[in-house]
Image (spheres, helix red, strand yellow):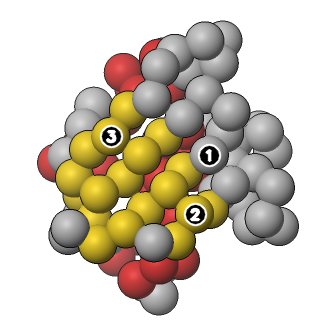
């Protein structure tokens, strides 16, 4: 399992001004060694705007969903964890 968080030096957290949905895309791109633009739309797996709204105040719960052959978990502390299904 790869655990990409706001503290690991990468840009997978959204404390840098990005959104949770952007962090998810960057995490998948990093794990798959692909350009983010080469990935299928995130909206094929989850509503990106709803995901971002859930974490607007960082009071949302944990969200887990499948995308691009991976299980993605997003937490309100900025953590985006990814592992293969």
The residue pinned by badge 1 equals 79
Real-space Cα separation, disc 3 to disc 2, in angstroms = 13 Å
Please tell me the numbered disc located at residue 3.
Answer: 2
Mark 3 crowdedness (10 Å alpha carbons): few <14, some 14-19, many ≥20: some
Callout 1: helix, strand or loop?
Answer: loop
Q: Is residue 30 visible?
A: yes
Q: Would you say the residues marked 1 and 2 are in contact, meaning their CB atoms lie under 8 Å apart? A: yes
Which residue is rendered at x = 68% and y = 48% of the image? Answer: 13
Displayed quadrant of residue 38: bottom left
Is label 3 in contact with label 1 (beta carbons under 8 Å)?
A: no
Q: What x and y, as percent, mark residue 70? A: 27, 65
Which of 69/18 is in front?
69
Residue tagged 3 = 64
SS class of the residue under badge 3? strand
Mark 1: give few (<14), some (14-19) or many (20+) Cα within 10 Å. Answer: many
Rendered residue at 72%/60% (across/down): 11
Residue at left offset 62%, top offset 46%: 79
Residue 28 visible in the current orientation: no
Find residue 15 and report its image quarter.
Answer: top right
Q: Earlier in the sequence, mark 1 or mark 2?
A: 2
Residue drawn at x 45%, y 72% is 1
Q: Is residue 23 above or below residue 53?
A: below
């Amino acid at each position: 399992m790869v655990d990409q968080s706001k503290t690991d030096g990468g840009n997978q957290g959204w404390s840098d001004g990005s959104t949770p949905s952007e962090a998810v895309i960057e995490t998948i791109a990093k794990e798959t060694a692909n350009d983010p633009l080469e990935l299928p739309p995130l909206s094929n797996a989850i509503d990106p705007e709803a995901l971002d709204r859930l974490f607007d105040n960082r009071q949302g719960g944990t969200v887990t969903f499948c995308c691009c052959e991976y299980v993605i978990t997003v937490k309100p502390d900025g953590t985006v964890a990814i592992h293969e299904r």
